[in-house]
Amino acid sequence: MKNCIVGQSGGPTAVINSSLCGVATAALKSDKIDKVFGAENGIEGVLNERFIDMSTVLKTAEDAETLNHTPSSYLGSCRFKLPAITDDAFYKNVFDIFTRNNIGYFFYIGGNDSMDTVDKLSAYAKKIGYDINIIGVPKTVDNDLTETDHTPGFGSAAKYIATTVREIGIDSDVYNLNSVTIVEIMGRNAGWLTAASILARNELFKAPHLIYLPEVTFENEKFLNDIKALNASGVNNIIVAVSEGIKYADGTYVCEAASSGLTDVFGHKNLSGTAKVLENVVREKLGFKARGVEINVSQRCAAHYTSETDVTEAFDVGQAAVKEAENGGTGMMMAFERVSDNPYKIEIKAKEISKIANGERVVPAEWIINGNDLSGEMITYLRPLIMGEPKIRTENGIPVYLKR
Amino acid sequence: MKNCIVGQSGGPTAVINSSLCGVATAALKSDKIDKVFGAENGIEGVLNERFIDMSTVLKTAEDAETLNHTPSSYLGSCRFKLPAITDDAFYKNVFDIFTRNNIGYFFYIGGNDSMDTVDKLSAYAKKIGYDINIIGVPKTVDNDLTETDHTPGFGSAAKYIATTVREIGIDSDVYNLNSVTIVEIMGRNAGWLTAASILARNELFKAPHLIYLPEVTFENEKFLNDIKALNASGVNNIIVAVSEGIKYADGTYVCEAASSGLTDVFGHKNLSGTAKVLENVVREKLGFKARGVEINVSQRCAAHYTSETDVTEAFDVGQAAVKEAENGGTGMMMAFERVSDNPYKIEIKAKEISKIANGERVVPAEWIINGNDLSGEMITYLRPLIMGEPKIRTENGIPVYLKR
């Protein structure tokens, strides 16, 4: 019997530990897998052989339940880009570590960049004929992985965003004056999270009145005209949802003037301040009361308020990954296929990792209306993902979470 | 039988409508009160005679239940400072409106500035011998009203802040590097909300590691030394809770460089950006990864996650206000007196409004430790206020709220 490694990588979500819980509990029960090692800080923990015996973490059903509802990466995370698989020195070291620890299974929970790790490790294993089953488990609030209907973590973030935008809309609507509130939501290139704000609307509540995604070139002129038109139609308190990643026609980010210009190790620009920039544009050009509100890291880690559908699916996809590995699968990512919208039904399938790694799925152009709104198809797509509220265990009035 | 007016004023809270619900349901049942009018946008709605018949709002028990859990001011709010009671023209107009609408009871739900309205109206009524019972119902996330143990709205904000700071702490702790996360919390002069972040701590989670209140003069030097000392003691990911209102020794706000310098009608400075200023200080002086996170308006309107204790007390204090008025009280504010901490027990008493209006209760100096932490007394005081999670009714995955 071989041992397995499970690791977490990339940015936190509210349910990345639900997937860890799914993988670990299935692997601990598996009669094909011996020890279950959690790698601290993803692939960095593999390189440093910092492993946690998951049987010591999940001693009771209550431990598993608590882990299942703990936000962020219990095992820690990393942003470590693997070199090309021509770098034999690097990969020889990794596979020596696998050999030394008798590793036959490797599960990696993460987003696009993490799937690149899964892709490279499986390609190298194949190249040297090392017998290992390497499976990616999807995770990202951004919902931008290809080959899957959606990603675990997105549904909870979407629910938090929709609820918070409804509450901000109500909060902004108490005074009797013209105001514009610009709510900034995560999403560098894909507008899924910002799009989710549309779920704040119902018959009573019309916020967000305008939605701008990074998929559409942003123009100050159009933005101001959109606001003026709304105001002229009688909307006094206007709520605008914008993605942090909206860009002007020349390719510069709206926030660029206010940002530090720093990039992370993957070359992604460090964005923030889009709402503040637009707040000033509105105040200066229209003279309305304007306020920029950044929905900050809470959108990805508010485990006190998750989608039950998301938590369940994140757990299930972890379990399915172990089953896929037991059945001999490797170089695959587990993915959701939607069978029907209503009643909502999905199936979990394994998809080839090489098609997914470093890919990016953006909002379809045909779902975007007039550059500032979304179609009913988007609502049909999104709604099932935010359904249900799990009961959260609290102690002294705040949620109980696990820590390594 | 006389009619009554109920109004809401000042900034939103998650439970100001629970108090409205408490007042309105008690007044609708009262055999001393005929019609129950909700004034739109507080005293502005009185001046414009924009009244809502509350019996049409609360037709069913479900309506009341939904209102009880709807954030912000259902009736709308205002920031309108009444002139001195020597301004007979102004007050004659107000009391003509009272006469015309047969008003014998006036309930005003709000904070310090709103209690100033209650104080002036009762003083003027006394001056002209107009028979009316005017009662203030406390409301403010800031918890800075005098003569009361605490204020409705604070407990829910405190619970949201403590939970969010715990989650931000977990979110910040995933990478293996030195980082400082500065969490900015509301509070212009009183540090109660920032202090509530201490409830995020337990045996496992130590965030927030440092807490800075506006009650203590802020010094960049001490702040940087506090961080260096923590880092030297082995804390890699440091979470700092700061009040938006912290000031340097010369009286300037920390955020002042970044703020607009605008003031509101009460002359309060418009603050924001404290966390961003300190983020830059840390990055420049210590070279650590630094991030400023502003817990924005959600701290006062996140009705999806309230303290059951707070919701219940907010309702009860509204009911008690009606009883006080029925018994002939006027020029009073309903207040909480704490009978015991454990088991937690409070009593609701009427206090003279003149002692409360425009007053401000700050955090006692003896509860502040070393300028960056709080004593056990603070925890004992705060904890009962955040207990319990009401069941929130959802529709399509997000909470159901009421709209006028």
Image (cartoon, coloured by chain):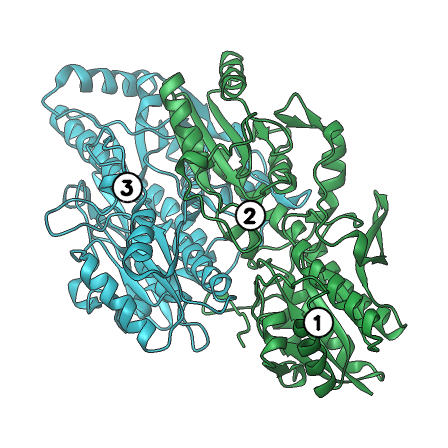
Chain colours: A cyan, B green
Q: Residues within 10 Å of mark 1 (few under 14, many from 20)?
A: few
- Mark 2–mark 3 contact, CB under 8 Å? no
Which quarter of the picture shows residue A35? top left
Q: Nearer the viewer, mark 2 or mark 3?
A: 2
- The chain holding disc 1 is B
Q: Residue at x 66, y 46 (%)?
A: A397
Are discs 2 and 1 located on one and the same chain?
Answer: yes
Residue A130, position in %: x, y?
A: 20, 25
Label 2 sits on what residue type?
A: His
Instruction: Please indicate whether residue A206 sits to the left or right of residue B222 in the image.
Output: left
Residue A211, position in %: x, y?
A: 29, 62
Task: For mark 1, give the secondary structure.
Answer: helix
Task: For mark 3, give the secondary structure.
Answer: loop
Which quarter of the picture shows residue B371? top right
Nearest the viewer among B1 and A105 is: B1
| Residue denoted by label 1 | B88
Task: For mark 2, give the secondary structure.
Answer: loop
Q: Nearer the viewer, mark 3 or mark 1?
A: 1
Is B308 rendered above or below residue B202? Answer: below
| Residue denoted by label 2 | B268
Instruction: Please indicate whether residue A93 sits to the left or right of residue A394 in the image.
Output: left
Quadrant position of the C terminus of chain B in the picture: bottom right
Label 3 sits on what residue type?
A: Gly
- The chain holding disc 3 is A
Label 1 sits on what residue type?
A: Asp
Is A384 rendered above or below residue B235? Answer: below
Is B376 rendered above or below residue A320? Answer: above
Q: Residue at x 41, y 67 (%)?
A: A178
Residue A150, position in %: x, y?
A: 29, 55
